[in-house]
Image: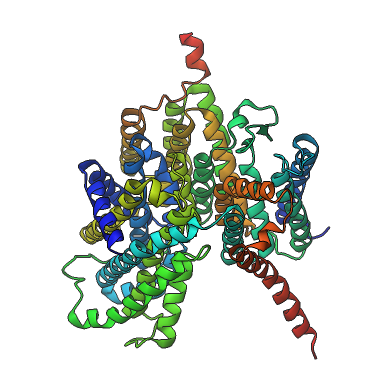
Amino acid sequence: MRNLNSRTVIAFCTFLLALVWLYLGIYEYGVWDARHRPLPGLFPAGIAAVLLAASLAGMVQSLREKPADYRRPAFEVAASLVLLVAACFTFGMLPSLLVYFVLWQVLVEKTPVRALVLSTLVVGAIVWGVFVWWLQIPFENGIIYDLIMY
Amino acid sequence: MVESLQMLAMGFSVATSVENLLAAFIGAILGILVGAMPGIGSLAGCALLLPITFKFNPVTAIIMLGAIYYSNMFGGAYSAILLNVPGDSPAIMTALDGYPLARKGRAGKALLTSNVSSFVGGVIGMVILVFLGPALARLGLKFGPSEMAALMLVAMTSVSWLVGENPVKGVIATCLGMMIATMGVDGITGNVRYDFGNIYLLGGINFIPLVIGFIGLAQVFELAENRFSVAEPIQEKFSILGGLLTRHDIRRITPPVLKSSFLGTFVGFLPGAGATTASFLGYAIQKKFGKNEEELGTGAIEGLAAAEAANNAAAAGAFGPLLSLGIPGSGTTAVLLGGLMMWGLNPGPMLFASEPEFAWGLIASLFISNLIALLVAMISIPWMAKVIRVPVGVMIPSIITICFVGAYATTNSMYGVVIMVIGGVLGYLFQKNDYPVAPLLLAYVLSSSLEINVRRALVISKGSVSIFFERPISLVLMLVFFTLILAPVIRGILSRARKQRP
């Protein structure tokens, strides 16, 4: 198990997923009816069977591969995305995005003030102009807004 | 032939309405800007800009999308030439000669050569598309469910095989794409499958947020990890006049441009091939058989012209199987197919007959977009250096913001955002672990059609799989399919045997 790495984990996850699909396809949705006509489970179960075999091969192959190299900035991005989704649900989408946009540049990138103001104005204009004004998307208001208003 | 020209003229009357021209113009500008930004590329560009088309009617929306797709190809060359960072995989070959040319102080000439070659390649590709597209659709009309199913299997397999170096990972990505697509309502019986009791999953996983995440958001992780490895841009002031091609330059690039344009178009027509394969082939043929004043790879405009003409011709050629058979040849055309389906249009053999205004309007708009993209690309040469200098630190939160609002706009709920974020993380893990993303997207968009055709064929044959081997077209396609599956296995066995030989 010395070479167990994210490549093995991915192949193992697809293996589990294939098992679920195969089981539901055969036992829940059915494969053939009495008159040899295909049922909704046939196609997904067939694909899952292929994936099952490929995932097994992938797991074996992954033990010979070099582990993937993950770097800290990717984890920063992932963590910020989770926080951003939570903030969107709580405080609303547009305010959360604005705060995120500014904070990321100030705290992580140390962007100069001039570039920060300019980029905020440009991206803000795109978001407001295209999505709010033109497409009239009713963006998420967030739990706090809903609690106050209703 | 005359009929095709008449239909094309009708297409031009559709495409030249004020609204459609404006859409093509805006699409061309946005496509070039996004395509030029290092690390984004045409696939991510199309995915990110897809939500912008929501407001338009289907024809205008697809015309804009076509313009975005096409001009992205022009834009991809900028970062390749000025930064040595190919915006997307077809631009890899562009960087080989484009960047050395720019380092020699001839960046303006390199950009203009790339633009002109792209334009000519595109025009040749489109002219061939006008005549071969309807012919392919007529051939497609002869296809029954078994032939269509076999063709889709070939398309999916060839993409898995061509895109990744690792067939096992290609198969995993393809199967995963198909399995995700089976969630939601079954296209034949109307029963709900794999919803796991979740109300949001009743309608399945929405393609647009998924693709925005898998491609656009995943790119952010890459940018964050590699933010310090972007090369210094060429510090040169560009002008259109300074980069003008001389008569001698034109004589040098004409043969490679013509050769690569024809080659690229036919490669584009092949399911599973596409612009990347075309640019590799165009460049390789120029290197091996072409007359080159300078050695390729050291800043020869012949190499640059060959690669750019081939990739734009293939981009046009890829519309052939996409419109005529409903088979996308690459990840980007899979996104386009997703967009077409979102608008309720089903590309396939019947499209030219049932929706001629749309099919020919789109083809005509490609000619217009190509011209607009050339003009915008040439005029913007002096400013492009500034566009590609946008710091990665600004691009990261900007792309995340656009991904969030774009994904939300698709579903009008946070469901789209959640799908997009999950897709982004998965896309990043895919990239990191060398899983190809294009087969997953292609499998996703083709899955429903493949399933319907497989099940129809099996109903006709009363459950016998022999139907896929009884008719000549499906038999040939199935043989190709099995050859594609078995080729890497046989190759592996042979190479192992060769290694064991003393």
Q: In this view, does B123 lie above or below B51?
A: below
Residue B367: quarter of image: bottom left
Confirm whether residue A22 shows in the render.
yes
Percent across and percent down for residue A147 are: 51, 11
Residue A59: quarter of image: bottom right
Residue sitting at 83 percent across and 58 percent down?
A: A1
Percent across and percent down for residue B103 are: 33, 74
Residue sitting at 69 percent across and 62 percent down?
A: B168
Give the camera-side residue of B476 and B231.
B476
Position of the N terminus of chain B, as image quadrant, is bottom left
Percent across and percent down for residue B30 are: 32, 49
Model colouring:
rainbow
Q: Going by the image, does B470 lie left or right of B137?
A: right
Residue sitting at 74 percent across and 57 percent down?
A: A54
Q: How many marks?
A: 0
Position of the C terminus of chain B, as image quadrant, is bottom right
Q: Residue extending furthest bottom?
A: B502
Confirm whether residue A110 shows in the render.
no
Q: In this view, does B229 lie above or below B301?
A: above
Give the camera-side residue of B205 and A108.
B205
Q: Going by the image, does B11 lie left or right of B425?
A: left
Percent across and percent down for residue B424 are: 56, 45
Q: Residue extending furthest left?
A: B241
Q: Is residue B229 above or below residue A9?
A: below
Give the camera-side residue of A85 and B130.
B130
Q: Residue extending furthest top?
A: A150
Residue sitting at 21 percent across and 71 percent down?
A: B243
Give the camera-side residue of B260 and A125.
B260
